[in-house]
Image (spheres, helix red, strand yellow):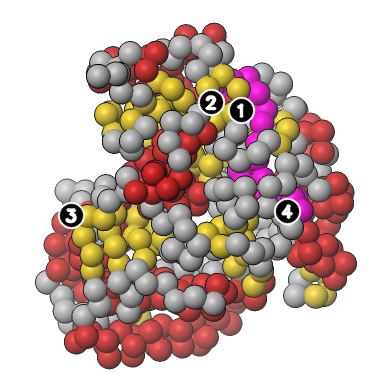
Amino acid sequence: MGAVAYVLAIDLGTGGPKVGFISTAGVAKWQTHVPVATTFGPHGQATQDARSWWQIVAQASRQGLSEAGINPRDVVAVGVTSQWASIIPVDANGEPVDECIMWMDRRGGSDVRKRIGGMAAGYAPQAAAAFLRRAGAPPSLGGDDTAGHLAYLSGRGKEIGDRARWFLEPMDYLSMRFTGEAVATSASMCASWLFDTRDPNVTAFDATLVKRLGVDGAKLPRIVAVGSRVGTVTDLAGLATGLVPGTPVVTGLPDLHSACVGSGAVEDFQAHLAISTTSWLSCPVGKKKTDIAHSIATVTGITKDRYLVVNNQDSGGRCLDWLGQHLLSGNEGAPSIPELLALAETVPAGAGGVQFTPWLAGERTPISDRHARGGFNNVGLETSRHHLVRATLEGVALNSRWLLQSAEKFTNHRFDAIRLIGGGAQSPLWCQIMADVMDRTIEQVEDPRNANLRGMALFAAMAVSETDLATSAAKVTVAQTFTPKREHRGIYDDAFGRFTATYAAQKKIFRNFNAHRSE
């Protein structure tokens, strides 16, 4: 019997890297997670130390090889998936010249508006038409995407940009640390909106869009096909990680794409829902399409001829973390997630009439409103911490239902059943609430918290011809299926009506509170 083949898979989330040695069959032999903090500053700044990512990954790789007893020669590929719509300015050797500009950083908003802003829903008509026709969507006017970060580094942050040789997404940055090659794909840099995706297999930036955004095209990385090889592990990287020099490194994936593979929902209109730091609802489709009114579009998919539906809700699972750490913590510290979930278990559906709106960092889909903020409504003297936790779980689910309406209309398909992944999917209670609120069957995948890590490993195995997409999807198992409870239908229908009405009633209030914070 031959040796088991492994992939060194890295899932660089907002909370820090997960690193694992995963077999080409999708089974984890060893894995770890190391938290990394985000630094917040004035004018919407949100950054992380990209140098620490590489240090963590290199150390974890050596540790995993040793503790799991894996022969480095049995590692057949390296693959990186990560949070995206973030940019690291690096020098010619791949060393950061400054911190990573994270996906939630809004400093580039005024730079984007200066280049393509106008009177047509905030955009200059010709610019909006050019981006819509070619890329499928225009850059965010809030600056919180790759395009905004590129505009910032070419505008008010030019002092940083001038020191950089390359502008790279996190997955491509780590791939460069392994290979020395500054390489990206139309998937990894999809949030730049600088590709003509009328061809889903596009392998070059669009010169017209690059010019409109005012970015130096020479600082953009070489584009290769999704699923190809970036290069191989260098001698220096091999020394740092314990891997054999020459080990193939495959193109990185945004977490959207690795989630698709890791959920097993890889056929057209098979949907997966992620409840991670943020939240999204996606599926593969065959056509390029945009719904600018609800911030839904398609981007390059996991195969050469398909697209993926892209949308995002800025606060998903982190709402529960926020509640525990900032509202319910005491002298003994913050309650654990299991402790919070135990509190919610004691409260019936409807949370005693308490409503939570989860727009802690603004919202993107199905409404784009950077001024929106979260809150609890209908809190009374009888409200307990148990009600607050239950309302938080239900609020995230109600927001997902709001997204579901637009996503199903966008695809012209009903999603049922929906694969649920992410940290939030570990809770059977939250899975059931999702099913009840959304009125859809929810399939909790096995080990949902590590779906992205598994998906990246399976994708890398495909790239080096160790498996194929259908076989990989079949390896993803469903741990438990949750069907909507009829007795909760009326409760959550009423709650959803109040939820959307709350946003409509508070929209102007949000703007009055937060308009001055836009810059």
Q: Can you give x and y, in whole percent of width and height, for residue 14 in the image?
A: 45, 45
- What residue sits 82% from the left and 33% below the top? 218
Asked if marks 4 and 2 touch (Cβ < 8 Å), the reply is: no
Distance from the alpha carbon under mark 4 to that under mark 3: 46 Å
Give SS at disc 1.
Answer: strand
Name, please, the residue furthest toward the front: 1
Placement of the N terminus among the 4 image quadrants: top left
Looking at the rendered structure, the kind of residue marked 3 is: Pro
Nearest the viewer among 38 and 11 is 11
Q: Can you give x and y, in whole percent of width and height, for residue 417 in the image?
A: 34, 69
Which residue is labeled 4 in the image?
A: 199
Residue 377, relative to residue 33: is it above or below?
below
Looking at the rendered structure, the kind of residue marked 4 is: Asp
Residue 65, relative to residue 383: is it above or below?
above
> Magenta stretch?
177-196
**Quick one: label 4 or label 1, which is nearer the N terminus?**
4
Q: Which mark is residue 249?
A: 2
Let me know if residue 52 appears in the view. no
Q: Which mark is residue 338?
A: 3
Nearest to the eye among marks 4 and 3: give it: 4
